Image (cartoon, grey):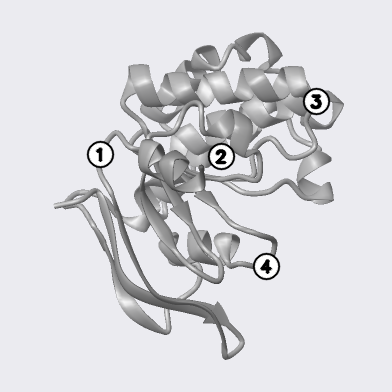
Amino acid sequence: MAFVYCNNLTVGYEGRFILKNLSFEVEKGDYLCIIGSNGSGKSTLMKTILSLIKPYSGSIVFDEGLSPNDVGYLPQQTIVQKDFPSSVYEIVISGCLNKMGNRPFYNKKEKDLALKNMEKLSILDLKSKNFKDLSGGQKQRVLLSRALCASEKLLLLDEPVAGLDPKITQQLYSLVADLNKNYGLTIIMITHDLGESLKFCNKVLKIGDSYFFGTKEEYLAKAE
């Protein structure tokens, strides 16, 4: 069975259908890019996969042992998120909250996980820094580390390079590609940056007036 299987999904909000009868599947280890014009429903689809929005019809089936609570999520940054008055460590370890249930304090396993993910993304030296004082690229690394604390199986990214300069954009793409290739993390990423993102993904989902789902090579051949 696929890691995530979306079958005949119809999604939207406030009674408005945005995507109808959409089907695709994500295998373990895939790097899927979701593309489409503004307003085509990319973020709505991602929130539906996360169970933040209920589909009007159709189903989303997760592999055994994987649930929406096991998914790491890096949403589009808001002004509020950019100015969190918290330390880097506090933000990263907060990614473990869904795993804690009603337990009020972090345990050693969660503390070690936070430190491991900070080291993985080369921000361990920023541990005590105030998040709001960091650069845009550093902030995205912190939020990515937080998402990894939520899950080291499946990571959903919504326009992770928006507002970043080209150099930092390249670095972030390389980080995500490394997590996919060398750590086995399955990636689903919304992007407008086709030129760079298509260098790393292996599958493409295009939504809008028409749908396409297939390999990167199939998409590029169709686009020629």
Report the residue marked by disc 3. 165
Q: Which structural element holds mark 4?
A: loop
As rendered, which of 211 and 179 lies closer to the eye? 211
The amino acid pointed to by label 4 is Gly
Given contact means CB atoms under 8 Å apart, are the residues at marks 2 and 3 in contact? no
The amino acid pointed to by label 2 is Ser
Ranked by sequence position, the earlier of labels 3 and 4 is 4
Ranked by sequence position, the earlier of labels 2 and 1 is 1
Q: Position of residue 114 (x, y in %)?
A: 49, 25
Callout 2: 10 Å neighbours few (<14), some, many (20+)? Answer: some
Ranked by sequence position, the earlier of labels 1 and 4 is 1
Q: Position of residue 128 (x, y in %)?
A: 71, 18
The amino acid pointed to by label 3 is Asp
Given contact means CB atoms under 8 Å apart, are the residues at marks 1 and 4 in contact? no
Label ID, residue 94: 2
Ranked by sequence position, the earlier of labels 4 and 2 is 4
Q: Position of residue 99 (x, y in %)?
A: 38, 46
Looking at the rendering, which quadrant does residue 201 occupy? Answer: top left
